[in-house]
Each structure stands twice: as structure tokens, then as C-alpha cells.
Image (tube, rainbow, N blue to C red):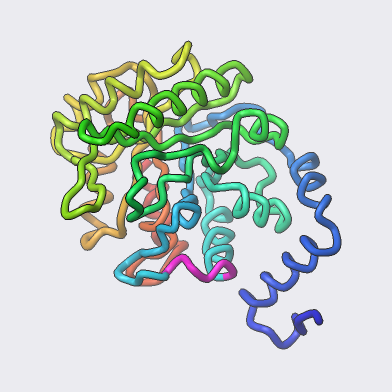
């Protein structure tokens, strides 16, 4: 029985329509990917990239702004993503296959940069979190879907032997994407466990080490971009590599103005070429998604 989309809330009606298409016309997903208008080059006129990230749910990481299930409502998440993608200066989206498929069906990805998230098997809070398996896109699927690149998460924990498998998997993904002429976005961290939970080490020295490891992954670095947090002494951090980098947003900031100022300072560095921000823009504390996105674009 279908949902009455005339009486349902906009988010619920959107979910109902998407599900109806998935049930009755599953081939519509491939058709939408095939007809998507791709932009002629990765970078636009500004030479910068502004990407909205929404690959957190695929790892079971649903919290934002103090709400442990903020990202659990798919209809609301899609509404927020559509709002963000409509704002001037937003170049595209980073997400796992299910979210990208929804956005393709909604027809909001024409002319956008679309990056597919690849290793999502390191579920947040799991005992096997560092063993970050490639459970989402692979390079073949990214190329076949006409996406613009793939993203991998690399957390290096010297005390966890599973790090070696994750390193190898990320290296293979970088090589495979480069072989297809696609961007490989690598998000590296030095990590360790605190009270059984994986925590990223956000110090200058740790990020220098993480970037040095990530830059050497794969058979070529020709298509590799880095995705890095803002930490103390970013000039020293970014001097560790000549690879282009995008700044990540991380958790919703207690002080959005301070976060913006940190991005602005780091964006002056020659290798920093834009932003990849998710929860900070999609779930700002004041609820104003458009305003948060516009402020980030202004920082560029």
C-alpha cells in the first residue's frame, strides 16, 4: 500500500516516492546515473572545491550536535542535502551508494562533483573498527556510475595489526582509481584506543605522520587528494606533502565562528584547495543549513 504523498510530511513523502521507484523500477538508478550531466572539469572557475559530506551513516555514525540519532531520518537528511547542494558555490557531495542513489533519483546531482565513499566496514564503536573493509563503492562501480572519484578512510593504529590490511586496501583503491583517471581522496589519521574506543590523534606531529603515510599509498599519487582536519600549526602539517588537500569539518563546532576562522587561515596555504564538510553544515546548532553553507562558501 502506497503512502498518500499529498497528506504526508515533505520528508516522508520524499521517502515514499523514492521507495516506490526502488520497488517498481530498480533500473531507474542506473538510468539516472547514466543521464547525469557531469561537469567538464573537477575544479570550477574558483580553482577551489566545496564538497558536502554525508557518508557517516554508512559506518553507523549517526550523531550530530549532541543528538545520537540526528542523521537517522533519511528524509530529513535528504532535505538538508538538497538545501546544501542548491546553495551557490557548492561543488558537490561525498556519500555512500545508498545516499548517492537517492540524490540521483531526486535529480540534484547534475553538474556536481560526486565522490563515492569506499571503505565503510570499520563501523563506529566496533571492536573491528580499524579493520576498515571496503564494503561500499569499488573503483569499477565508481567509474561505471560516472562518478568523479572515490574516498577512503585510513586510520593508522600502531597497536592494532588490522591497520596493515586497511593500509593495503587503501593503497589498492588509490591505484585503481588513478588507473581510471579518477580522484582518490584519502582521509588519514593516526589513531589509538581510549577506554576501548578508537580516537584520532589531532596533534601537529600526528597529522604530519598521517599525511606522509597517505601520500605514498598506491602505484601513483597523480590523482590523490588529501582530506585533513584543522589542527595546530597547519603550515607545518601541510608542508609534509605536495598533494592537494581539502579541509574536513568534523563534529559540529561549539563555536562556528572559530571553526570558520580556522578554515580561513588554513585555506591560505598553497596545498589547501577547499573544504569537505558534513555535519557542521547539515546539522548546525541554529538549524540554518543554508546559512551554515553560505558561511563556509564565503570562507573559500
Quarter holding residue 237: top left
Q: Residue at x 56, y 47 (%)?
A: 96
Q: Looking at the picture, does residue 172 appear above or below residue 32?
A: above
Q: Relative to the observer, which residue lies in front, 247 or 102?
A: 102
Nearest the viewer among 192 and 81 is 192
Whether 173 is drawn above or below 265: the answer is: above
For the N terminus, give its image quadrant.
Answer: bottom right
x and y, in percent, of residue 135 in the image: 54, 42
Q: Residue furthest top?
A: 219
Residue toward you, 5 or 193: 193
Image side of residue 47 versus residue 126, left or right: right
| Point 56% across, 53% down: residue | 85
**Magenta segment:** 70-75
Q: Position of residue 259 (x, y in %)?
A: 25, 51
Task: Residue 72: say if magenta.
Answer: yes
- State the quadrant of the C terminus: top left
Secondary structure mostly taken by the magenta-highlighted segment of the chain: loop
Q: Is residue 197 left or right of residue 71?
A: left
Count of all numbered marks drawn on residues in the image: 0
At 75% from the left and 69% from the top, the residue drawn is 17
Query: Residue 283 occupies which quadrant of the picture?
Result: bottom left
Q: Residue at x 73, y 55 (%)?
A: 105
Whether residue 175 appears in magenta in the rendering, the answer is no
Residue 126's x, y, as percent? 35, 53
- Residue 239: quadrant of the picture: top left
x and y, in percent, of residue 279 in the image: 39, 57
In the rendered view, tell whether residue 74 sits above or below residue 121. Answer: below
Q: Nearer the viewer, residue 157 or 23?
A: 157
Amino acid at each position: 500500500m502506497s503512502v498518500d504523498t499529498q497528506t504526508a510530511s515533505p520528508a516522508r513523502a520524499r521517502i515514499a516516492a523514492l521507495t516506490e521507484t526502488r520497488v517498481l523500477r530498480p533500473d531507474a538508478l542506473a538510468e539516472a546515473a547514466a543521464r547525469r550531466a557531469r561537469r567538464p572539469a573537477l575544479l570550477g572557475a574558483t580553482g577551489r572545491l566545496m564538497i558536502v559530506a554525508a557518508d557517516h551513516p554508512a559506518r553507523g555514525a549517526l550523531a550530530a550536535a549532541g543528538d545520537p540519532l540526528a542523521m537517522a531520518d533519511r528524509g530529513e537528511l535528504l532535505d538538508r542535502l538538497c538545501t546544501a547542494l542548491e546553495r551557490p558555490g557548492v561543488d558537490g557531495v561525498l556519500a555512500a551508494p545508498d545516499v548517492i542513489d537517492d540524490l540521483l533519483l531526486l535529480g540534484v546531482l547534475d553538474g556536481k562533483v560526486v565522490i563515492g565513499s569506499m571503505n565503510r566496514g570499520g563501523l563506529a564503536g566496533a571492536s573491528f573498527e580499524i579493520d576498515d573493509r571496503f564494503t561500499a563503492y569499488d573503483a569499477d562501480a565508481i567509474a561505471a556510475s560516472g562518478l568523479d572519484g572515490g574516498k577512503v578512510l585510513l586510520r593508522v593504529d600502531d597497536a592494532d595489526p588490522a591497520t596493515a590490511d586497511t593500509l593495503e586496501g587503501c593503497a589498492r583503491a588509490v591505484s585503481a582509481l588513478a588507473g581510471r583517471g579518477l580522484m582518490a581522496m584519502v582521509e588519514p589519521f593516526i589513531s589509538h584506543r581510549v577506554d576501548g574506543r578508537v580516537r584520532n590523534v589531532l596533534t601537529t606531529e600526528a597529522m604530519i605522520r598521517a599525511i606522509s603515510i597517505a601520500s605514498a599509498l598506491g602505484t601513483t599519487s597523480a590523482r590523490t587528494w588529501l582530506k585533513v582536519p584543522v589542527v595546530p600549526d597547519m603550515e607545518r602539517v601541510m608542508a609534509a606533502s605536495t598533494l592537494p588537500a581539502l579541509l574536513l569539518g568534523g563534529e559540529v563546532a561549539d563555536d562556528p565562528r572559530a571553526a570558520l576562522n580556522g578554515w580561513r587561515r588554513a585555506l591560505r596555504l598553497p596545498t589547501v584547495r577547499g573544504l569537505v564538510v558534513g555535519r557542521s553544515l547539515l546539522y548546525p546548532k541554529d538549524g540554518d543549513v543554508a546559512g551554515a553553507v553560505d558561511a563556509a562558501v564565503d570562507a573559500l
